[in-house]
Image (spheres, helix red, strand yellow):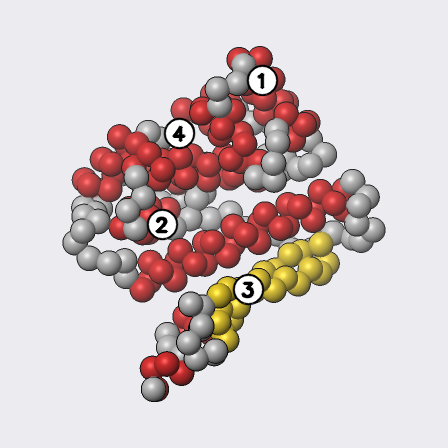
Amino acid sequence: MGHIEFDMDARSNDSSKAPSETETACCKVERTATAFDIEDVGTELVDRRRHQDSYRAIAEHLNVRVIEAELDRADVTSGRSVHAALVGEDVAEAVYRVLRTDSGSDIRRAELRARLSEAGIDVDRLESAFVSHVTIRSHLQNCVSVDPDRSPPSFEQTVNTTQWAQTRASNVVQSALDRAVKTGQLQTGDLEAELFVRVTCGDCGDTFYLTELLESRSCSCSEA
């Protein structure tokens, strides 16, 4: 069985990301993705369903991405009071848990809503953008006609999924480094984290960076 490693390079960062272009949306899933500049959502949701993810799990995943996008837009960093109301590294998931699925007190939920508002986030707009599992089912069945038993995911979907996962991991590391710099735990300037996924075949021992493997699509096992 093969294994996967991560390489990370951190260096000074003076670049910024340009916002994505919006497209005409035909249902709430696409309207939400457009409103919050969430890219590749259609392919990602189809891929998750074809991998047998439940509609509810897919809905929660999209809702967390909505929160991530809004936190990024509002530039909510470790220096903001939002983090003081949360536990754990993944702030977006923690926000969703408190707003939607946490069995904790109403006081904690009200406190978080207040802190999000102070950070410049329209919480009512955010929550109204959340999709339900029924909406996800309707989107997948009626808009894109996904049948999870019809065929395996395409290679393009595999590429998109791995690239999304690598980007997500890089963002988590970046957030942790940013907090360490701002709190003085790291004595550096602004850092930019870049992760490289390294994959090794457990049979032949060939090692690739992820991009190399996706380009070659084979290892020495194919020559045996």
* Residue beneath disc 4: 130
Numbered badge on residue 108: 1
Foreground tag (2 vs 3)? 3
Q: Name the residue under label 3.
A: 5
Mark 1 residue crowding within 10 angstroms, few (<14) / some (14–19) / many (20+) = some
Give the residue type at disc 4: Phe
The image quadrant of residue 90 is top right
In the image, 52 versus 176, the foreground residue is: 52
Q: Mark 2 points at which residue?
A: 44
Which is more N-terminal, label 4 or label 1? 1
Residue at left 42%, top 48%? 39
Q: Look at the picture and state if 209 lies above or below 88.
A: below
Query: How dense is the environment of label 3, judged by Cα within 10 Å: few (below 14), some, or many (20 and up)?
Result: few
- Where, quadrant-wise, is the N terminus in this rendering? bottom left
Task: Assess disc 2: are there few (<14), some (14-19) or many (≥20) residues with their C-alpha within 10 Å of its C-alpha.
Answer: some
Disc nearer the start of the sequence (2/3): 3
Up/down of 100 relative to 52, above or below = above
Would you say residue 211 is visible in this rendering? Answer: no
